Amino acid sequence: MTVGTRLGESTAGAEPSGTDDDGQVLDAYSAAVIRVAERLLPSVVSIQVETDDRGGGGSAIVLTPDGFLLTSAHVVRDARHVAVEFATGEDIPADVVGADRHSDLAVVRCDASALRPASLGDAALLRVGQLVVAVGSPLGYSGSLSAGVISGLGRSLPTGRGSGARMIDNVIQTDAALHPGNSGGALANTSAEVVGVNTAVVGPGIGQGLGLAVPINAVTRQIIGSLMSTGRVRRAYLGIGGQSRPLPVSTAHELGQSRAIAVASVASGSPAGLAGLLPGDRIVALDGIRTVDLAALQGLMVESRIRQIVTLDVLRDGRQLVVEVVLGELVD
């Protein structure tokens, strides 16, 4: 939307370009972005990374006053040397505490004190059309902001390949401009709460030019906590590939759910394979918890289920089966 006229352009005979209401909206928009800038800029830093064969950079978000920072896993992948640059221009060496490629999140720590932590929000509360602000260091320009709206929710971003491939679920799509260097930076709501970690990664089948962010929610908060405390995230492993498919109307009515996971592939020697799962099976539930898509199933692959027996409710050739599986542990 263009408000007003260009310098020197005549307004004679033109419709009024803005009403008082328009002016108030613009002021509210500006005030919201400025508020985020004032609160969040001190909590988002630049990060420089060196590996054996490349150099690069990104952004990071202050988690604690004593130097724990949140960034993207791909930013610090294979890092040999990491340094954090603050708004004061001071560079401080940092260590990678832990990285989880399956969520594209990582935690680094530098020897600092009295940092200003960012406030973490909840991406589950976001709505399409909501104003958000991206804060980071795009193309090396530290302390940069871009504003936009939530363009979409519930997107999926693939990570990894083969039997270890997973999907980052509930990814946030925004039209706030993101560029290389924004990765690891904050996507914030107008309360300056971090609701996402920006990523410049564009996965297969996803169009260029989309701004994507890993959500901050109950699941990713647990991941961050695990990375801070143990440096790793442990997950249970089933060993299937598949996608959400609708159930026949009569079956859906009987089970009380409209979709299930249609198994497309079963990894050789995996827990699913050893338990006798077959391509074409539809997984309806795990331990009585509905599994309508891979996101729901992956959310149940928590550390406490590693090497535990779980029961799968499965549909096969119109029959309902209960399959017991001893879950393994997902390894890279």
Image (spheres, helix red, strand yellow):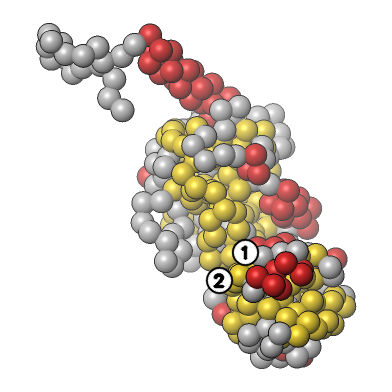
Q: Quadrant of residue 114?
A: top right
| Residue at position x 73%, y 58% in the image | 231
Above or below, 118 against 238 in this view is above
Say the numbered circle drawn on residue 102: 1
Q: Residue furthest front?
A: 250
Q: Position of residue 282 (x, y in %)?
A: 68, 78
User: x, y percentage for residue 296?
Assistant: 70, 63
Residue 39, quarter of picture: top right
Return the residue found at the far right.
309
Query: Of residues 58 and 5, which is closer to you in this image?
Result: 5
Residue at 52 percent of width and 41 percent of height: 128
Asked whether, in this view, residue 155 is left or right of residue 321, the answer is left
Taking the image as shown, residue 195 lies to the left or right of residue 173, namely right
Q: Where is residue 104 drawn, in percent x and y?
A: 58, 58
Residue 261: mark: none
User: Looking at the figure, which quarter contains the N terminus?
Assistant: top left
In front of the other: 65 or 291: 291
Label 2 CA crowd tier, 10 Å (few <14, some 14–19, many 20+): few
Which element type, helix, strand or loop, lies under badge 1? loop
Q: Which residue is identified by label 2?
A: 160
> How far separated are the C-alphas under marks 1 and 2?
7 Å
Type of the residue with mark 2: Gly
Q: Is residue 56 above or below residue 43?
A: below
